[in-house]
Image (cartoon, rainbow, N blue to C red):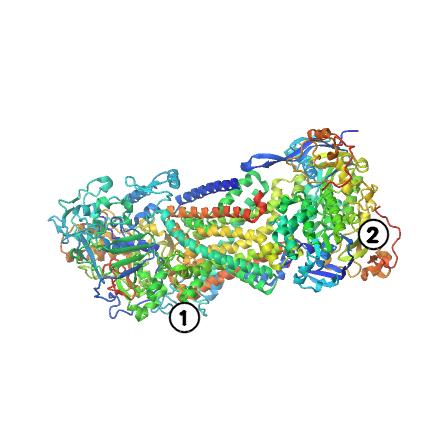
Amino acid sequence: MKMRATKMLAAAAVVAFGLTACGGGGAAKAPSAGQGDPYAPVIVEQGFSEKGGTVNVLMSSDFATLDPGNSNYVQTANVGQLYYRTLTMAKETAGQPPEIVPDLATDTGQVSEDGLTWTFTLKDGLKYEDGSPITAQDVKYGVERTYARDVYTQAPQELNSALSHDDYKGPYKGGDFKAIETPDEKTIIFHLKQPFAEFPALVSRSNTAPVPEAKDTKQDYTNHPVSSGPYKIKSYDRGRELVLERNDQWDPATDPNRPALPDEFRFSLSTSQSTISQKLISDADPNAITLDSNGALQASDAASLNDEKISARTAGGFLGCIDTLNLNTETISDPEIRKAIALSIDRSAIQVQYGGARFGQLVNSQLTEKMVGLTEQVSDLDPTGKPKLDEAKALLEGKDVPKELVYGYANSTERYKNIGTVLQQNLKELGITLELRPIPAANYYTTLAGDGMPDIARAGWCGGADSSSARMTVDPNLGPSLDGKTYGFSNIPRFYDEELSKRMYELRGATGTAEELGAQWSDVYNEVMATYPLIPTIHSYTNSVVGSNIRNAQVGYFFGAIDLNTVGVEQ
Amino acid sequence: MIGFLFRRLGAMLILLLVVSFITFTLFQFGPADPAAASCGQECTPERVEQARIALGLDKPFFVQYLAFLSGLVGPRMLGAPGAEQVCAWPCLGKSFQTNENVTDMIANALPYTVSLTVGAVVLWTVVGVGMGLFAALRKGKLADRLIVGAASFGVSLPIPVTGLVLLLVFVGTLGWLPFTTNAIRSPFGEAGFFGWTTNYLLAWIALAVLFSAQYVRITRNNMIETFSEDFMRTARAKGLSRGTIVFKHGVRAGITPIVTMLGLDLGAMLGGAVLTEQIFSVPGLGFTAVRAATSGDLPVTMAITMLAAFFIILFNVIVDVSYAFIDPRVRVN
Amino acid sequence: MLSVKNLSVQFPTDDGMVAALNGMDLQLHRGETVGLVGESGSGKSVTSQAIMGLFKETRAKISGEITFEGTDLLALSEDRMRTFRGKKIGMIFQDPLSAMHPFYTVGSQIAEAYRVHNKVSRKAAKQVAIDMLARVGIPDPKKRVDNYPHEFSGGMRQRAMIAMALVCEPELLIADEPTTALDVTVQAQILDLISELQAETNSAVIFVTHDLGVVAQLCQRVVVMYGGQCVEQASVREIFTAPSHPYTRGLMASMPHLSGEDDRLTPIPGSPPALLDLPSGCIFADRCEFAALVPDNRCQNERPQLLVTGEHAARCHGHEMSLLPKTIKVGA
Amino acid sequence: MTATASTPTTAKPVATGRSLLATAWMRIRRSRIAMASLAVVVGMVLFAILAPVLVAIEGQDPNTTNTTPEVLDNFYTPGLPLPQYMYPSAEHWLGVEPGLGRDLFARLAYGARVSLVIALLATLVSVVLGTILGAAAGYFGGKVDMVISRIMDLFLAFPHLLLVLSIAPILQSRLAGTALGSGSFVPIASLVIVLGFFGWAYLARVVRGQVLTIRQQEFIDAAQSYGTSHRSMIFKQVIPNVTGVVLVYATMMIPTNITAEAALSFLGVGVKDPTPSWGQMLNAAQAGNWYLSDPWFLAVPSIALIITVLAFNLLGDALRDALDPKSSR
Amino acid sequence: MNTPLLEVSELRKHFPIKGAFGRTVGAVKAVDSVSFTLQRGTTLGLVGESGCGKSTTGKVLMRLLDPTSGSIKLDGEEISTFKGKELNAFRRRVQMVFQNPASSLNPRASIGAAIAAPLIEQGIKPPGGVKAKVRDLMDRVGLRPEHANRFPHEFSGGQRQRIGIARALALDPDVVICDEPVSALDVSVQAQVVNLLKDIQRDTGISYIFIAHDLAVVKHMADEVAVMYLGKIMEQGSNEQIFADPQHPYTRALLSAVPSVELDAALTERIRLGGDLPSPSNPPSGCVFRTRCPAYALLPETDRARCADQVPTGEVACHFPSAPLAAVAAHR
């Protein structure tokens, strides 16, 4: 089973081009704005419902694509809510994993007895921006396009890998796709390889955005995707400006999930992050927000968040991403050595590199308490992130400890390099010399998956489309290959244990309630983690300053930035 | 003259071809695999292969190069087999990273670079040549020594230092000027001339500090040399006024190397002032090129390298031609 | 008309002040042609440029006196001096190619020289330039007026240079080695031209050269220079028949003559003095074969004064004390 | 304005007993600015050579991070050194850097090594290439000249920074794991190669021009007239006469290369953290806009850079003046 | 008479003019069909104005330039086709003294090294060693041997010319080609060098080709004289014949153009050449001198046609050597 979350890729891609946002740090002190729980979500001016006005979205780079069939990017997913709809929708609520709700479909799908067939029915009155009706065939065509991987190299594949007939080559070469049936204009039936309990979450991905075949301009579809949502593209000057205006063919009655408050969204693309943060902090543009990671804040901007006037305009919230340090289990095969390495690392110093506690919480597990059915997680790691050097050294007694290790990092990001510097110093205590090896950011994950996997590498995991499910984290990160014989493709530490991997393989097809399944996955995870294939570090918390006219600004758990769906503007 | 131009343009084409070939070749050895880069974390070897085919990277080196060249002559087909699209002339390919048409990217970036160049060139020419001339006229006096000292200091200021210090002082501390925004491409837009000027002012100054200093030195040295020429003595012996001697005889004769330098600098600047654009986040050619170069985006890097080489060579030719207008001795030959 | 007294010019260099001129004296009368002769570094060009006031506003140190028609030129401001330059004193230089501005036409440069001192229209000035070119013997002046200096041959350029210097009909023409860069046949043309023009305009000429032959042909009076001093001054005939200074004598003897017999030349031993570090005595003493004749090492210790006897002046202890042998070998 | 340059020098004194270099040295010694520049240059080189000693005396290490709340602020601006650590103190002579809390003096000193080694070696590469190719082009003329000159044109027409920018990462990836080493040595080696390889063309052009002039001189004819071989012609007659020019250009090229290293490292394609270099330090200062809240962090490498570049430039100027027979002062 | 030491016949040196795209579009005929002989122990003076090809002739003889065509025989042996080792060996027999004392010595080599260089390059080990030989040579040219470690810039122009002469003598050549060896020197120093060259010839029986533009110096040096104009020899003959009884109008014009120190010079015939030197890439047909020849204008039509059609040959390259010349300056 190939199941990979998109967020991780998206984060990597965004960071690759974003400036080296955020380098400073601080330790245990919580953000001053949050009383009590420092990591509670902060929504700016909640409960606003007036329509009208323009929201100015400042971004440091253009969207990689606007084509729902070619998008693995959170930013595209965020803006995509405004102009395309999908069968189901991952609806954001601040601080919560998204809730899967019906969107184009009347419900979240009907599953067959054997769990291999899911059926969805489209609502009535659905129209494109040109007034033509949205049909089940269009949804099917949208999914088909994502199989043309030679054309859409970034097409999301989570859904595709769950469906049968996965040798399909896409509509341009492969003809009709047998895994999806559309008996009429309203009904759409998916055939799966294996049962997949979280299937409703998979169809919330952009694959199921309807694309009218007649309007498919292939690679150039990104320049003007046909709108099925509340807004449509008014103008798009690549690299400079995107303007979205209301789509008068959109019927709010069919769409309870989208408040669609502003009349217009104006995206300024490729404004430098310094400018963005400066503009936001100084409230130079009261209608402004940003979609850049970390709210485009620079390390030195952290001080301004202590200003009450500014913190009142700062939306805050976790995003689904948890960063880890992955240990190559092939080159560091002894679990005790891995544990010693894990114990020797000063994770509080790493937290500083993320900007301190305000920008991320130290975690000892990749599983969050929001996950359904979570069982108790145990870890020998110090909860404050301090190294346990004596314990680590004791573990290494009499072992053949490697003299030299390599830490690989994406070359575009200052922070990841700094983490290496911290690691270098920590491992010196164990008598290990660490070499820091930059890897071109664009090739980073490919390198990790290939022969270039270093001994230690940082990665982020954002929990997949359904971030409330433990499976969506555990399986792709640590699970076995499709045949259960080796490690899975996104398994960066290359974890494979005959017994544990077999258990995970079997769990994939298991049925049961979400709680039951969640408990089973988290138990496996607990056992896997006792061998330290990876070291959880930081659960990122985004602070995003918005203009003073901006209302209902919440940080999306999935988007890691202001949720464009809910935002409004005071006129 | 026409023959000369014809030959220079011919040589220019050949040089550009060589530049393109070298750039193209270099990238075959690049660290970044564009195919792998274009499919990100979810890559399977099979997907990388598909991406490779879609980007045309599966073809032999020379086929790729010829395909690239064909885009310079006429429209060209791009994209995965079966889903090709026309890339209109002049086609420089599409970005491996964003799939954007490179010609459009360049057209988008150029106004920023031009804005940066125009202001900076005007500023440094006026300041540099003016002060250089003034110093030459005051040779050996206090003003001269001060200017020469300042120029020595100026040429020793690296752009990153000047740029960051300017940002620190005028944006960070004093707050007199805003961070550069990409919304202003020209003085003819919404922001108007004033907005344009304030937007680019610091970047201009950062460049002008370095270049003015160089121009002060070259102008001063040239003028001093010119002032010691025999014909300047003749001009004095005729009883001409100081102004006539300095400007009509001296400056006219001493300006040639400055024009040369200005032409070459202008050409180099139009190719993208990499550091300045980076520091001040001006999304011009240099800025785009840095992104492309560090991420292995071959079509973009190639296009900007070639464009930059084109500007350099073009201004070389312009300088040569302008000699004919300045110096009658060149006109005959 | 022109009187130069005790003129000294010093230039600052790395190694200290260089005394290019050490107490130069020179008198010039209206309509007279005086030759300023000497080897390189003797100060002849410095003298002419000092008279022209070209050292004003430079780092050179000047002392002494230059009086032109009763005006002390050294005391004049640069602005006042401008009214003399070109208008009352014209100057031609050794290398006309570098002395003319390469970017302007010959005609415009002549016209410019005229227009500085005469309020006329451009057109009229151009006509003056054409006339002047014709006068100095440039064929087809109407066409040549629009040529650039590099389009002229060496001889023509020097003619144009002369035209430029004489366009305001100055009372004094200073010719600074005007024929040195030219071939003999062209030199002959130019010398003819200068003497013709002088005859026409009756202006005085200071002719700077290192060639005694040129002096003999052109000048009435000769000033022989050595080490930044005038060592001898006399009429041409006097100089050639009865030179008083041992240097002048040596110079004559070392010159190869066309009509002389084919025997050995008699060179002056040693080389010209270093201006940086001049001896306190006679500058020529260390090369002088007669210095030993003068008692008390006077030549080594005491700088001789210019002794004027009638029209003849010489700066030599030996001559002053009549110790030099009377018989001298003359080139003729 | 001087109209006199030619007049006094024509009577150059005889037998002063000084060789050209001695004259140059005398002129340099006489200039206070030149001597000060020389002192700074020598001082910087010593500073770089003695870096381990100096840092040992200070008692710090360039790579030891210190992120404890006692050193770095963790509340107001997380990562910013507390005032007593931000600025010079007895413990940290130049304070510590933000973010990782490493000792700035140690990094500056070790950075000096890297920056100067890159600049000097790159200059050496350029000078050797430029002198030999330029001399060959100028001396042999004809086809040799044609080929070398065209290559020079090509190099001069290339947008340097852009190309270096593209090539540096390529070289680094290609050099990794080769005999040229691994780790921090690779970026240094690749910068030396890239800067050295792109710096020669200009010098070669200058040398070629000089050699063309020298070829016109009669002593070359003279040497040819007694049957001098090409080899001794180039090495005994031609190259000794361009050493002055080469020396001046080399001196001028060093600061250019120091700046180039800084620029490339600043852009992130040169020397990379944890290896310190002045350019890398500038890069770190810009990262996360640290220079705005900790200007001292920007000032330290900047001042070192400016002083060094200025000293080399002034020294180059002085050397040029001293070796130039035309200079009159 | 036995075989002449050097026999040059029909020597040509043409420099191609490159047009666009490297095509040869013409040639500068710097030396065009020059023939002469040089006897052992004598001096041949090669005289003419700038651009006449005399220096190029010297360089071709030295084989610094390859002749375009023609023959050069040294002791009866054809040397114009020598290459490699033969050429190297030839260089021992013919040496050269250059014009410019400032540039003829490598400024970075001590003068001892400069004088020793020919010996070292030729691999000659003189009996007493190289050092002794250098010392001997320095002594011979009047330099102090202890100065061998000094550098050229420490010497005066005259001394540098002596160094150049010592270098030329180092290989004990049969012929020394002196290319304007004294024209850059001051008169008094010039005489020293002229005398030195004559002394050496007297002592060693060496032969000189003496190239100069100064007729008076040539008169002092040469036994035979060849007058060149535009790449051709106009007239050649013995010293006495050329100076006492010149036949060619050009020689006569040249001689009469030299300013003379004789105060009665006005009595001698004055011939002035008009116009400019024609371009050597496009010389006049027939007699190259005809465009400036003072006699040409006075010739009848048929004779002029002959001048335009036929190239004159012989010792006096003139169709009408005895034609009367225009006595008055023809420059207008």
Q: Amino acid at mark 2?
A: Ile
Q: Is A148 placed above or below C113 here?
A: above
The circle on residue D83 is 1
Amino acid type, label 1: Pro
Residue E291 location (% of width, % of height): 70, 36
Nearer the observer: mark 1 or 2; the answer is 2
Q: Quadrant of the N terminus of chain C?
A: bottom right
* Residue A531 on image: x %, y %: 26, 56
Q: Tell me, yes or no, if residue A29 can be seen here.
A: no
Residue designated by label 2: C239
Helix, strand or loop under label 1: helix
Q: Residues within 10 Å of mark 2 (few under 14, many from 20)?
A: many
User: Is D194 on the left or on the right of C236, as rendered?
Assistant: left
Instruction: Give x and y (percent) for residue E100.
Output: 69, 46
The image shows residue A407, relative to residue E61, as above or below, that is below
Residue C168 seen: yes
- Is circle 1 on the same chain as circle 2? no
Percent of width and height locating residue E159? 74, 49
Crowdedness near tag 1: few (<14), some (14–19) or many (≥20) residues, C-alpha within 10 Å: few
In this orientation, which residue lies closer to the viewer: D195 or A398? Answer: D195
Q: CA distance from mark 1 to mark 2?
A: 90 Å
> Which of E239/D218 is in front?
E239
Query: Quadrant of residue D290 in the image?
Result: bottom left
Q: Chain of mark 2?
A: C
> Residue A347 versus residue E329: which sits nearer the camera?
E329
Q: Nearer the viewer, residue A501 or E6?
A: E6
Q: How many marks?
A: 2
Give the chain of mark 1: D
Q: Secondary structure at mark 2?
A: helix
Q: Are the residues tagged 1 and 2 within 8 Å (C-beta)?
A: no
Q: Which mark is residue E196?
A: none
Instruction: State left or right for residue C242 relative to residue B1.
Output: right
